[in-house]
Image (spheres, grey):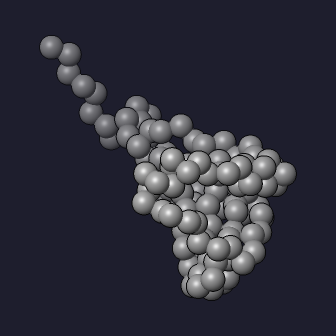
């Protein structure tokens, strides 16, 4: 299954960071542009596949570039930064917003009743 998510890429002073706002908890860091592109592709793919394997709902890729810009531009509260132990966020050299298309393998259902070799459960 192919999915396309908007990704926020941030060039920091020493490396790159990337995250997909539609997929909470999925982000990556890389030393170069080429590395961050590879890392976020692999990270998004693995994150979605693990969610599907665990039976979690698929995070719908619904955010537009404009919505991602607004989302990313919202100020992080001083309280949240304090709880994370961050005095000042690292300076950003540049920020890019791009769509990333991933190819996700959908797991086979664990209890596939159509399997002819599967023994029926005994009722007892």
Q: Quadrant of the C terminus?
A: top left
82 or 103: nearer the viewer: 82
86 or 20: nearer the viewer: 86
Q: Position of residue 84 (x, y in %)?
A: 44, 56
53 left or right of 40 in image: left
- Can residue 99 be seen here? The reply is yes
Up/down of 120 relative to 1, above or below = above
Q: Position of residue 72 (x, y in %)?
A: 71, 55
116 or 40: nearer the viewer: 40
Up/down of 118 relative to 89, above or below = above
Residue beneath the point at 41% across and 36% down:
112
- Can residue 4 be seen here? The reply is no
Q: Residue furthest top?
A: 124
Q: Residue furthest right?
A: 66
Query: How many numbered marks appear?
Result: 0
70 left or right of 48 in image: right
45 or 114: nearer the viewer: 45
Q: Position of residue 80 (x, y in %)?
A: 51, 49
């Amino acid at each position: 299954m192919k999915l396309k998510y908007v990704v926020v890429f941030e060039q920091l002073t020493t490396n790159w960071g990337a995250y997909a706002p539609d997929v909470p908890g999925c982000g990556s860091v890389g030393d170069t542009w080429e590395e961050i592109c590879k890392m976020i592709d692999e990270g998004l793919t693995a994150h979605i596949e693990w969610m599907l394997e665990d039976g979690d709902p698929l995070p719908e890729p619904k955010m537009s570039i404009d919505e991602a810009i607004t989302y990313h531009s919202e100020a992080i509260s001083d309280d949240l930064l304090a709880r994370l132990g961050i005095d000042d966020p690292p300076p950003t050299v540049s920020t890019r917003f791009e769509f990333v298309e991933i190819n996700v393998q959908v797991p086979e259902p664990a209890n596939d009743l159509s399997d002819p070799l599967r023994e029926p459960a005994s009722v007892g």
